Each structure stands twice: as C-alpha cells, then as structure tokens.
Image: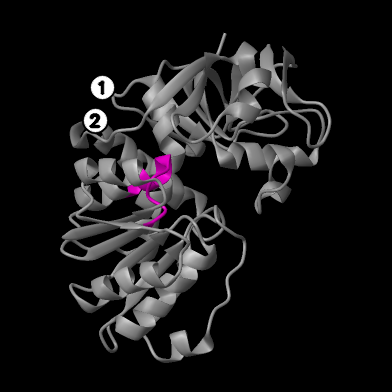
Amino acid sequence: MKAAIVLEAGKTPIYADFKEPVPANGEVQVTVSAAALSNVVKSRASGTHYSSQSCSSSQLPFVVGIDGVGQLEDGRRVYFVLPKAPFGSMAEKAVIRPAQCVSLPDDLDDVTAAAIANPGMSAWAAFKERAKLTAGETVLVNGATGAAGRLAVQIAKYMGARKVMATGRNAEALKALSLLGADVTIHLGDGGNAFEDALREQFGGDGIDVVLDYLWGVSAERIIIAGAKAGKEAVPIRFVHIGSVSAPNITLPSAALRSSAITLMGSGIGSIPVDKILKSIGELMQATVPAGFKIATKTFPLSEVEQVWAAANSMPRSVFRMP
C-alpha cells in the first residue's frame, strides 16, 4: 500500500510503499480516505511530543499520522485515532480496535471531519472534561487566532458561555474572531503591562471563570497574575493549559496562588482518558454541521507529503487525501 513513511529519526516522511496491516483478534481494518496534518502529528513523528514514547516513532520505519477518516469493512464511515504501530493514519489502510473510532454523521464530509477533530477536540474536551464549563460562565481563550483557538471561541459560545474573550497578536485575525462569537478581543502586544491592564479590567468587571491557554509563556504568566490581583475574592478561576506555542516554561509567583482561587490544570493525552477523548470527538462531530463550526482547509494528495510537510501551518488545515 502507499503511505507516508519515516525511514530515519527526525527526517521528513516520504511517499512510498509499506506493508499492509493485518487485523489481529479484536481489531478491524480501515480504508483511509483523509488524514490531517497537525502540530501533534509532526511532533510525534519527530519524537519530540510529550506522548511520543507511546507512539510509532519508537520503531523505524513507521507510517506517520495519529488519526483520520475512513470506512470500515461493514461500510460504516468513521473517524479513528491511534492506529496500531508501526502503522499510522497517512496510508491507504490502518488497523484499529473498534473502541478507537466514532461513527460520523452523514452530513459531515471526510475532509472537514479529519481537519476539525484534533483542534476541535482540544477545546471540547478541555471545556467538558477539565474545566466543566457551564452555561452562563465567562471564558478567555489565550491564543485564539490559530485553528484551535478559533474553534475554542465557537465552541465556548455553542456551550452557552455568556461572554467570550480572545487574545492574539494578529490584529486582522482578532477582528475576524468577532464574527465567530468573541465578545472582547485583546491584543497580546509584547505581553507586557498594557496586556495585563486589559486583563485586569476583564477580571475586575464581569470576571473570568475559565481560561483556555494555547500559548503558555509570558502571556500565561500575565493572565495568572492579573487574575490573582483583580479576580473576585475566593471565586474560582479554572486555568486550563493546552499548548505551548509561545514558550515551554513560565515563571509563576507563589503569591498568585496563595492570594487567589486559581486552579491550574492541563488538558491532553494523559490528563484525559482515551475513551473520554473519543467521547468528546464524537460529540464534536455531531455538533459541527448543526452549530456551523468553521475551519479552513486545504487538501493535497498524499503523494505530495514531502513538499507539504515542512511548509504547512495550522491555517488553513492541511488534509491529505489517500490514493
């Protein structure tokens, strides 16, 4: 079968032939139709993702891709995740356990389903499984101008958030978020005093119940400090860390935790059981068309994986179609 294959650690995948996976007892084969290229896919393929020890990058050669859309032998169209190593999702065939897939609604096309699963799940699972967002609460999305952040704004509104605030560096992209449901946009700038002042105004006004953080680094520090200084006394602020686009570390003043009701938590593989992640994805897929969630996509044949791999970014989401 044709597949995107890593032959050497850290190298760009190539388009070549790979042995076809054979299902063992309790497994099923998927004929893959589409698989999206995300930062998680790239980092797991290179062995730099925090969850890489449990994925196929520990053995060479291997097929890249952690999830995709395809058809089971019984004709069901499904989204699937974490195929058995060394077989990834960017191939004509993959093997999975039935518990690792969710059925797709008829009105959701393969490309959109493949593209929206990972970035949409990051917000859906964070809100549902970690923050336990309830209707009427206020939400801040830190780093809202990427694909995941844009979806987080939309999903927060869909789940009944009373007010959604969004941060970002790109002024035009921030402006566009107003059309997707953002009630307030805050420019990151250099993440300094002006940014913190704008945050303190929001914490001191309507307050902020939930923070979804895709950036970490200085902006996360400023949000935590602003919440500690301006947040209402003893009112919980659930800070959910998802990504570290800006920096891998922060400096956290101990007083920020002692003097506030801020709760810090993470959301991702390891902090949420796989079955709960799949449950979140299933709910997301069912809601995508009725809610009108928007995600920009660009499709490529899998044969172009070498050219697309390095150049692709999160917007629009690159999706490979199988041969």
Visible residue check, residue 261: no
Cβ atoms under marks 2 and 1 closer than 8 Å: yes
For the point 49% across and 32% down, which residue is it?
80
The picture places residue 140, in percent across and down from the top left corner, at 31, 61
Residue occupying the point 66% across, 49% down: 49
**Residue 243 appears in the figure:** yes
Where are the magenta residues, as a range?
142-152
Q: Which residue occupies 45% across, 33% down?
A: 315
Quadrant for the C terminus, please. top right
Q: What residue occupies the far top of the structure in this picture?
A: 323
User: Which quadrant of the figure has residue 86?
Assistant: top right
Task: Please state which of residues 176 and 321 is positioned toward the viewer in this rendering.
Answer: 176
Label 2 sits on residue: 289
* Residue 18: x %, y % from top left: 74, 16
Q: CA distance from mark 2 to mark 1?
A: 7 Å
Q: Is residue 195 above or below residue 321?
A: below
Number of marks: 2
Q: Amino acid at mark 1?
A: Asp
Q: Which residue is mark 1?
A: 107
